Image (spheres, helix red, strand yellow):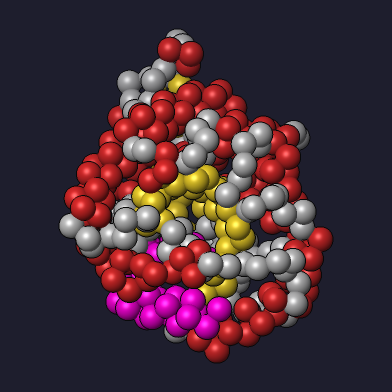
Amino acid sequence: MEKQERLHLIGSIPLDSSEQVFRRLSETLGPFLRCLPDGETGERARWVFFQRQMLLDHPAMEIDPTVPPYKFVQWDGKLVREIEQVRFKPGSDPQGVVFETGYDKAALASWAVFKRLRGAGAIAAGMRFQVSLPTPQASGYLYVSGPARQTYFGVYERALKSALANIVRAIPADKLAIQWDVCQEVLAFEGYFVDRPADYKNQTFDMLGRLGDAVPAGVEMGYHLCYGSPRDEHLVQPKDASILVEMMEGIAAATRRPIDFFHIPVPKGRTDDAFYAPLAAWKRPAACKLYLGLLHHDDDAGDRARVAVARRHVPGDFGLSAECGWGRTEPDRLPGLLKGHRDAAEAL
């Protein structure tokens, strides 16, 4: 893998502004990155949580009084939080509902900073600006009650594509990368959501294919598969990478345009062959980069061990990444994460 492709960052960084993120990442990891995220700072620091507030404030939405609060639990049964879920108000017409997700406004504000810093030489001329976007299922499974969820998926997809259209109109294709964050879908495949629909697999692949195809040619586009990280831990501990392989192949079959990269997570304790073995049979799309999220904070020896095991099973080359974004980790971990990533990239 080329030097500037060795690392991939999921999106969130525990800093205060996009300018701080761009400068810090360029200084420390720039030679190993092909694109820079803006850190998902401010209201996006808790990933899609700010979308819940958008829904609560929307005149067509209300708390659903017919369902109990949703219990959001960790892999070991610990309760992360309880969430009151919303529905469309009785009498509202979902086909006329418009959600303002805010992702386009955030992207365009960060793009202005990116351009200024690139013009000043603080960002390499060939670097792309990475925009990470959630799917409708991200907020749908968490914040919308079951009876309203299928309708919500369609309304939110329409809003998300509108935001994407605003982004790609404003940012040149050869300067842009779009990453689709695929988390709740992975959890559904793992059986985390007891009310997943019977056709959840086809529903998921069809939706992810439509989202991918909405990204114009020339824009780099890929998918980040995720097991969640609300407390720097997975919400589900996977048996192995077989579900990730199934999902990568299903997404590729449903997406007509080229997929430039996949990112998949690797739990910290998995230095065994069993986790990686399913990757040996993965049908990699042509010219698609694979990033393994096996870099963990303050675990250089473990990082090296996970890389060594992965090399025994992954066909072709691969790049490196963390399991997920860093925005919800302790800020004082950032120097160590940056150093660990740089050391791993230099050794790759």
Q: Is residue 27 magenta?
A: no
Q: Confirm whether residue 159 shows in the render.
A: yes
Q: Answer above or below: position of 97 versus 41.
A: above
Q: Residue furthest bottom?
A: 301
Horizontal placement of 196 versus 273: left or right?
Answer: left
Q: Answer above or below: position of 69 versus 341.
A: above
Residue at 74% of width from left, 66% of height from top?
Answer: 315
Percent across and percent down for residue 295 are 52, 75
Residue at 36% of width from left, 29% of height from top?
Answer: 169
Horizontal placement of 266 versus 121: left or right?
Answer: right
Give the quadrant of residue 35: bottom left
Image quarter where the N terminus lies is: bottom right
Q: Nearer the viewer, residue 187 or 213?
A: 213
Image quarter where the C terminus lies is: bottom right
Residue at 48% of width from left, 16% of height from top?
Answer: 94
Q: Confirm whether residue 84 shows in the render.
A: no
Percent across and percent down for residue 303 are 56, 81
Q: Answer above or below: position of 122 versus 203.
A: below
Q: Nearer the viewer, residue 338 or 318?
A: 318
Q: Is residue 326 magenta?
A: yes
Horizontal placement of 17 versus 230: left or right?
Answer: left
Q: Residue furthest right?
A: 281
Q: Answer above or below: position of 220 versus 90.
A: below
Q: Which residues are magenta?
A: 321-348
Percent across and percent down for residue 242 are 76, 59
Q: Main secondary structure of the magenta part?
A: helix
Q: Nearer the viewer, residue 284 or 59?
A: 284
Give the quadrant of residue 30: bottom left
Q: How many marks?
A: 0
Percent across and percent down for residue 71 are 52, 50
